[in-house]
Image: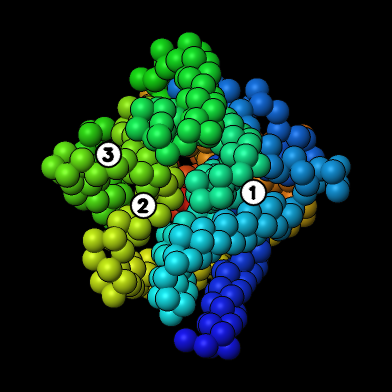
Amino acid sequence: MTMKMERSLKYAFWAIWALIVGTCACFIVFHAQWCIGDDAIIMNHTGFGIPFSPSDTILPGLGRFYPFAYLAYDILLTFSSGYLSATAHYWIHLAWFVVLSLSTACLFLSLFESQAPIWKYSLSLFSTFVIVFRLYPDYLNVFSSIWGSYTLLGVFVYLCWMFHAKRKAVYAILALVVINYAQFCLECEFVIPLSMGAGGILFLREEYKKGRWFFWALAGSGLLYLALYGTMVFPHIKHAYDGAHGSGVTLLSNTIRMFIGNKIVILALVTAAVRAVDWIRHRWDYTFFDNLLLAGLAFTFTCYVLRLNWTMYYNLGAILVFPAVVHFSHQYLKSPLTLAILAALLCLYGHKLPRVIRSNQTKRTTTAVQMESLVQSSREGKTLYWYCPKAPYGKDAEQRTWKENSLRSYIQWMLRDPSFDFEIRESFEADASGIWLECRENDLLAPDREKLSDHGKECFVSSGIKGYLCP
């Protein structure tokens, strides 16, 4: 292949990358809007111009410890000290999404550097967007800091690969900085440096004669976090809020469901089994990619132990193992079959994106319309009542309280009035005119209550909350 054709392939790769990443990035900020629910965590801090501090996310009694998770949002307060919009927060998401996409593309281009140009760019392009499409939906929501962990881990894997390929200490030092920050953004990430460090110390001694300090530093970093987490939080792990909580399934059943839902992790398990057989039978060398498999699968198991069984957490394991899956697929199956597997994964994740984007845009725009109408009614002097009949404490009552608090925070933010509050009512009062609000949990908590729909006209619907103008 001529240099001109190779240059054309390179330009085509980056043009396609820029087009797809740019389009996805636009929808991160387009119609950006708070939503009722966990967005209140952000709204009550940087939304009101109040910075996050590490103590806000150290909750030992709830089995949670992620002190640096939301600190990225504090960057916004250097540009404004007042109320901050949802759009401002989503610009942080956009920047981190581009960094993830760029580091992933550079990783695979370097990984396939020795291949013929047509295979180098096609394999790299498909591999990049398998990861990007898999992770992208979580950049569309502001309530979870998982997007930050995605980006940090993607950059960490790239830096580790560059240290492996170039043997330059600067990559190792940067990787240590990134993973040490990432550990304090999500509890279970400590197992990544710990397992990668242990694997390197035990099995990569000969290959890294002058770089073993990196593995010792990784292992030490993981052990330090483990000591903090083990003494402060782990004794309360039974109280951690798992994805199975209140859903009627067991912790193990939910774990299996999350595992089956992540096809990349399943492929990693199959790849690890093949590598284990080959290693036992042929005494093949343990490699950098085996170390990634070890770390990714160890991380996935740790999610189960620490009761962090959500798909978004399992995606972090996918970031670790996917380069290894691609590498070993290419080693065992060669380029054409590897490309076919990547194409299948790309179709699996890519065909869902238009629906995800459309759903997210609809949620944002409808929430904006509904909230503006509700707040305008408050400005016009209508009283807002929160209808919460007495009920025994439990998951549904807790959820009702959380929706009440979230909606209150939203209205306070829109009114720029932190003193705003609802009129709380345990029973319906026909002579109390205004807008009566309730959430669908009332159907379970107090099925025999006075129905608001019998007394007023529906005027608000959002996130399981309805409002009725009475009388």
Q: Residue at x 58, y 23 (%)?
A: 58
Question: In the figure, is residue 205 to the left or right of 341?
Answer: right
Residue 257: percent from left, percent from top: 25, 46
The image shows residue 33 at horizontal and vertical percentages of: 64, 58
Circle 1 sits in a helix, a strand or a loop, which is it?
Answer: strand
The reply to whether residue 109 is visible in this rendering is: yes
Find residue 387 and report its horizontal and vertical position in percent. 52, 39
Q: Earlier in the sequence, mark 1 or mark 2?
A: 2
**Cα–Cα span, label 1 and label 2:** 60 Å
Between marks 3 and 1 in the image, the one whose residue lies nearer the viewer? 3
The part of the image, by quadrant, that contains residue 14 is: bottom right
Name the disc covering residue 255, or none: 3
Q: Earlier in the sequence, mark 3 or mark 1?
A: 3
Q: Badge 1: few (under 14), some or many (20 or more) residues near its Cα, within 10 Å?
A: some
Dot 2 crowding, Cα within 10 Å, few <14, some 14–19, many 20+ = many
Number of residues whose C-alpha sits closer than 10 Å to that of mark 3, classed few (under 14), some (14–19) or many (20 or more): many
